Image (spheres, helix red, strand yellow):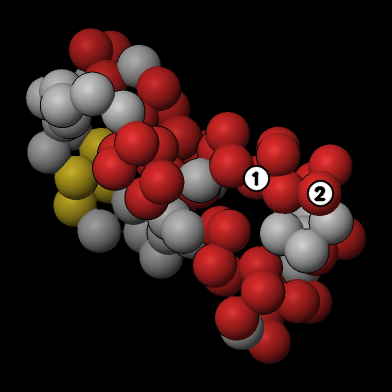
Amino acid sequence: GALAGGIAATMRPELFAAVLLNVPVANILRWSVSSTVGKMNEEEFGSASVPEQRAWLERIDVVDRVFAMAPQRYPPLLV
């Protein structure tokens, strides 16, 4: 749920007054290659090491989305 909440808040920030993210995986590109838990979840989320899967992960990576997009206002996030 927290990954979906982070994605929604960065894709459509105008829809939210605030967002509660409980234990989010906000940087899924890094998480999938740098942690044991990330490697265990590659079947569900994909791997940043596989080009086709990396392209999909880039579209949903909350941290990269915030830094790559033009400056905009995001709702308050409680993480």
Q: Earlier in the sequence, mark 1 or mark 2?
A: 2
Residue 30: quadrant of the picture: bottom right
The residue most toward the bottom is 36
Q: Residues within 10 Å of mark 2 (few under 14, many from 20)?
A: few
Between the C-alphas of marks 1 and 2, the distance is 10 Å
- Relative to 20, residue 9 above or below: above
Q: Which residue is mark 1?
A: 57
- Relative to 19, residue 29 above or below: below
Q: In screen coordinates, is 77 left or right of 43?
A: left
Judging from the image, what secondary structure is the residue with disc 2 in?
A: helix
Q: Nearer the viewer, residue 14 or 48?
A: 48
Q: Is residue 9 visible?
A: no
Q: Amino acid at mark 1?
A: Leu
Q: In screen coordinates, is 7 left or right of 71?
A: right
Q: Position of residue 53 (x, y in %)?
A: 80, 46
The residue located at (81%, 49%) in the rendering is 51
Residue 19: quadrant of the picture: top left
Q: Nearer the viewer, mark 1 or mark 2?
A: 2
The residue located at (58%, 34%) in the rendering is 59
Q: Name the disc covering residue 51, or none.
A: 2
